[in-house]
Image (tube, rainbow, N blue to C red):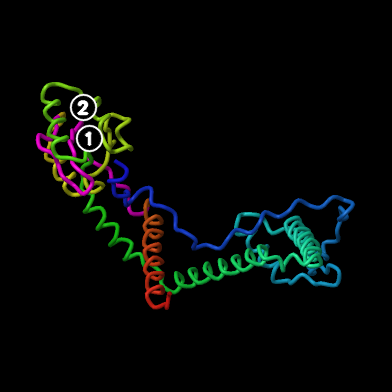
């Protein structure tokens, strides 16, 4: 019942969207010997290269070096040489592109403008999160809140979802006559579970909408609801297969995911506030 389930709050949280800077491109392979001498003096890697009279900014080199070491690469002459060679190749090609006037091409200019905007968006979000950090106390409070909502048990259930109450009553009547739940589940409107005989797997009550969870937890093992259960999705017939004590992951296990979740909420609110203040026609 994927459309009906609420995303599991402590596990499987989606990654934070677009809050980290783009990874730099992998350093290009060292150019062939004909283009770059095999034994470049070490001192040259500390000087910004000059290509056709154009000096490549030291800041660009430093930025890529910082990116590389942040990704676990050792700061050594080989890394610096790779960065240098890569920037030289980029500068040579960029100069040729400029000679051909490609930067004035409409599509190229559009891509440059969009790349610039994306960098600004990421920078703004990074700055916002830096100035609005999520404290450990806030994380712990959120963890305790979710833990309380989830409860201490999880349930393995099946369900059949239909549009009309009479359809649900007809299914219940057939179940009472001994027809198999799995077979009747082929009529379910829930594409996520119908192929599996209506099986929803193990989940805490908090993963479901309230009318569903309220009915599910009242069932005894192996029993099904004798009245249709109405929710905003339609009418359900529910069968409880089993229940068990639930092992909730510890705070430290989910702390980072919770932080990402709350940061995403911060970003969503920030965006909504900015849109509300903006004049949009």
Quadrant in which residue 108 is drawn: bottom right
235 to 130, vertically: above or below: above
Asked whether 90 or 167 is in front, the reply is 167
Asked whether 4 or 151 is in front, the reply is 4
**Secondary structure of the residue carrying numbered label 1:** strand
Give the residue at x 40% y 62%.
264
Quadrant in which the N terminus appears: top left
Extreme right residue here? 34
Give the residue at x 88% y 55%.
37
Give the residue at x 20% y 23%.
180
- Where is residue 110 drawn, in percent x and y? 63, 66
Within 10 Å of the Cα at label 2, are there few (<14), some (14-19), or many (20+) other Cα atoms?
A: many
Disc 2 to disc 1: CB gap under 8 Å:
yes
User: Which residue is tagged 1?
Assistant: 160
Within 10 Å of the Cα at label 1, are there few (<14), some (14-19), or many (20+) other Cα atoms?
A: many
User: Which residue is tagged 2?
Assistant: 181
Taking the image as shown, residue 218 lies to the left or right of residue 73, namely left
- Where is residue 280 drawn, in percent x and y? 43, 75
261 to 133, vertically: above or below: above
Quadrant in which residue 216 is drawn: top left
Q: Which residues are magenta?
A: 223-252
**Secondary structure of the residue carrying numbered label 2:** helix
Taking the image as shown, residue 107 lies to the left or right of residue 200, namely right
Q: CA distance from mark 2 to mark 1?
A: 8 Å
- Where is residue 79 drawn, in percent x and y? 72, 57
């Amino acid at each position: 019942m994927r459309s009906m389930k609420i995303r599991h709050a402590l596990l499987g949280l989606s990654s934070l969207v677009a809050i980290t800077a783009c990874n730099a491109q992998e350093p290009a392979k060292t150019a062939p010997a004909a283009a770059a001498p095999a034994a470049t003096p070490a001192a040259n890697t500390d000087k910004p290269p000059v290509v056709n009279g154009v000096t490549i900014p030291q800041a660009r080199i430093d930025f890529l070096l910082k990116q590389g070491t942040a990704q676990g690469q050792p700061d050594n002459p080989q890394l610096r040489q790779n960065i240098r060679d890569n920037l030289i190749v980029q500068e040579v090609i960029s100069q040729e592109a400029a000679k051909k006037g490609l930067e004035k091409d409409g599509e190229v200019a559009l891509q440059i403008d969009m790349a610039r905007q994306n960098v600004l968006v990421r920078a703004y979000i990074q700055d916002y999160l830096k100035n609005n950090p999520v404290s450990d106390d806030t994380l712990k409070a959120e963890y305790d809140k979710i833990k309380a909502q989830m409860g201490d048990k999880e349930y393995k259930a099946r369900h059949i979802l239909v549009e009309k109450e009479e359809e649900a009553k007809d299914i219940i009547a057939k179940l009472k006559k001994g027809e198999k739940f799995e077979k009747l589940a082929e009529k379910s409107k829930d594409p996520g579970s119908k192929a599996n005989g209506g099986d929803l797997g193990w989940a805490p009550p908090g993963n479901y909408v309230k009318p569903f969870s309220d009915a599910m937890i009242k069932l005894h093992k192996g029993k099904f609801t004798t009245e249709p259960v109405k929710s905003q999705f339609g009418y359900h017939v529910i069968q409880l297969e089993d229940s068990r004590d639930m092992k909730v992951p510890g705070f430290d296990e989910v702390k980072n995911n919770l932080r990402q979740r709350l940061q995403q909420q911060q970003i969503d609110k920030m965006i909504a506030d900015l849109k509300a203040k903006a004049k949009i026609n």
